[in-house]
Image (spheres, grey):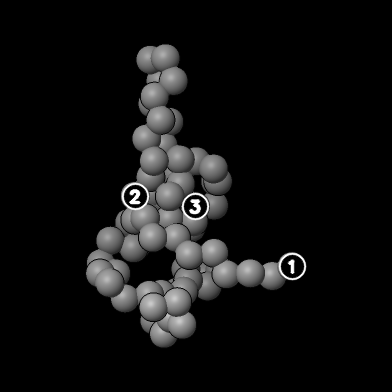
Amino acid sequence: MARIVLHERNRPYVVKVGDQELHLCGCGLSENKPYCDGTHMKTVDEGSKLYMYDKSGNRVEIESFYK
């Protein structure tokens, strides 16, 4: 079943396991899920607008019917 998943976070989740620190993807764009690969850096200037990212990483502003 296809569905839209909204990711409102523009930074990773930091999880400490013993003396290790893991960075888990919070933006949904990482190619290395569940781990962060830094792709969230392209989302830092989104502000309150809603965007969709295609497979090439291009950003398109969309209107939300969830508002």
In the rendered image, the quadrant that contains the N terminus is bottom right
Q: Residue at x 38, y 15 (%)?
A: 19
In this view, the mark in front (2 or 3): 2
In contact (CB < 8 Å): disc 2 and disc 3: no
Residues at marks 2 and 1, CA–CA distance in whole angstroms: 28 Å
Q: Which residue is mark 3?
A: 30
Q: Residue at x 37, y 55 (%)?
A: 9
Residue 66 visible at all: yes
Query: How many residues crowd around disc 3 within 10 Å: few (fewer than 14), some, or many (20 or more)?
Result: some
Answer with mark 2 or mark 1, whichever residue precedes in sequence.
Answer: 1
- Using the image, determine if residue 12 lies above or below residue 53: above
Q: Decide which of 65, 15 is in the foreground and name it.
A: 65
Residue 42: give x, y in percent of width and height. 34, 62
* Dot 1: element: loop
Name the amino acid type tagged 3: Ser
Query: How many residues crowd around disc 2 within 10 Å: few (fewer than 14), some, or many (20 or more)?
Result: some
Q: Is residue 47 left or right of residue 59?
A: left
Q: Which residue is mark 1?
A: 1
* Dot 2: element: loop
Residue 3: give x, y in percent of width and height. 63, 69
Answer with mark 3 or mark 1, whichever residue precedes in sequence.
Answer: 1
Residue 50: give x, y in percent of width and height. 38, 75
**Image-quadrant location for residue 40:** bottom left
Residue 37 visible at all: no
Name the amino acid type tagged 2: Arg
Name the amino acid type tagged 1: Met
Q: Residue at the front extreme? A: 67
Q: Which residue is mark 2?
A: 11
